[in-house]
Amino acid sequence: MIEMNIKKINEFAEYFSEFMGMIRENEPIAIISHDNTDLDGAAAALGIYLILNYYADHSGKIDLILNKTNQFVTEILQNEQLSEEIIINEGDIREEYNTLIIVDTPYLPPYFQKEFRHIILVDHHLEAENNREDPSDLSGILPIEKILCKTVDSTASSCSEMIGQLWKYLEVKITIPPLKKSMDESLISQLLLMGILMDSSGLKYSENSVIPILDFLIGKGADLPTARKLSIRDIPSDVKLARIKGAIRCEEPILIGEWIVLITHVNSHESAVCTALLGLGTDLAFCISKRKKKTFRLIARASERFQHSNTFHLGKFMEKLAIIFNGNSGGHKGAAGMNGQNYPQDLKKQIINELKKELNNSLL
């Protein structure tokens, strides 16, 4: 089959429907997301899992692998009695799968083999075609020649939004397998709705196209007030400490035109640190963390005002930095990240120099 690179989710839905008709009867299938899976990745994977169970004429094993879910997702899955039924850990992975469906990330965990008959990729992070291999060795680049279909919609604020649209388009009336009676339409709808809210910061980063999807999910049994309530949680102490350390370690604020830029460094929770710096009033926040073997991770966030005032795109900016530092990247207009190699002593200076160049070309 010819590799397909699909941008529109409706086109992907048509292909996915055809694909399910081609699955061999006993073909082992794995559905995975990134390690330390967040709610968006978990909900999207669950949605695909149930769609497959409904549509595919398939008696083989379908494994849903969410390895090392974060604490919040683990609590949600345990509360809904999902973890014991379908969630398996790294140690339980079958030796071989013919088909791999990967959501919310373009990377393959290191504990997976790279030989598949089919690979389907569903993601909402900006594609970075020139990225190098992951220098941290935490994940592997997918074998491109095996990807038969990929849909990457960087306008979607979450992968849950994409799966919700897929479900809506296919008008799936999910029939729960006998062993999965605790999972129903209202539960999966609720998780997808929560995934959308979490990844879009309460719809702050969503487009108008999300409204029909929300309406569809609510019609399937999701409840918006409940989703909002469950999405609000106390910030763990380690995250609070990282935020405080990040603020203390900030360099002198940098003014580029009218925009305030802050750069700091921590060992973990870089995204939370950047979000906290935006709350202090900065327009662009960058957080660096050193990793093994002189590699590093860089996370960035932009204020809503900054995003609406110019054409600067953090995801594209990180892609350029990834080329400079021989790494990989991904992200959106207002939120992005990258991994790089050979941590330079003047990294912050290089970031600012490249940032000035890009901002000069992006002002409206």
Image (cartoon, grey):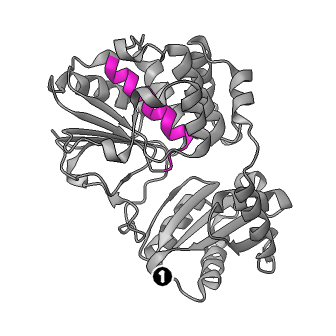
Q: In percent of the image, x 44 and y 73: which residue is there?
A: 323
Return the residue nearer the eye: 360 or 63.
63
Up the image or down, 108 lies above or below 361; here it is above
Residue 177 is at least partly visible in this image: no
Task: Say what secondary structure mark 1 lies in.
Answer: helix
Q: In percent of the image, x 76 and y 43: which residue is there?
A: 234
For the image, the number of numbered tags is 1
Image location of residue 361, percent across then percent down: 63, 69
Q: Is residue 226 magenta?
A: no
Q: Disc 1 residue type?
A: Lys
Return the residue nearer the eye: 46 or 165.
46
Image location of residue 12, percent across then percent down: 35, 31
On the rendered image, what quadrant is the N terminus found in?
Answer: top left
Dividing the picture into quadrants, the one containing residue 141 is bottom left
Q: Is the magenta stretch mostly helix, strand or loop?
A: helix
Dividing the picture into quadrants, the one containing residue 230 is top right
Dot 1 crowding, Cα within 10 Å, few <14, some 14–19, many 20+: few
Q: Which residue lies furthest to the right in this view?
A: 280
Left or right side of 290 for 206: right
Image location of residue 197, percent across then percent down: 65, 34
Q: Is residue 42 magenta?
A: yes
On the rendered image, what quadrant is the C terminus found in?
Answer: bottom right
Q: In percent of the image, x 53 and y 62: which residue is there?
A: 316
Up the image or down, 309 lies above or below 79; here it is below
Q: Residue furthest bottom?
A: 345
* Magenta span of residues: 36-53
Up the image or down, 347 lies above or below 159; here it is below
Write down the residue under mark 1: 294
Residue 212 is at least partly visible in this image: yes
Up the image or down, 187 lies above or below 73; here it is above
Image location of residue 16, percent across then percent down: 30, 28
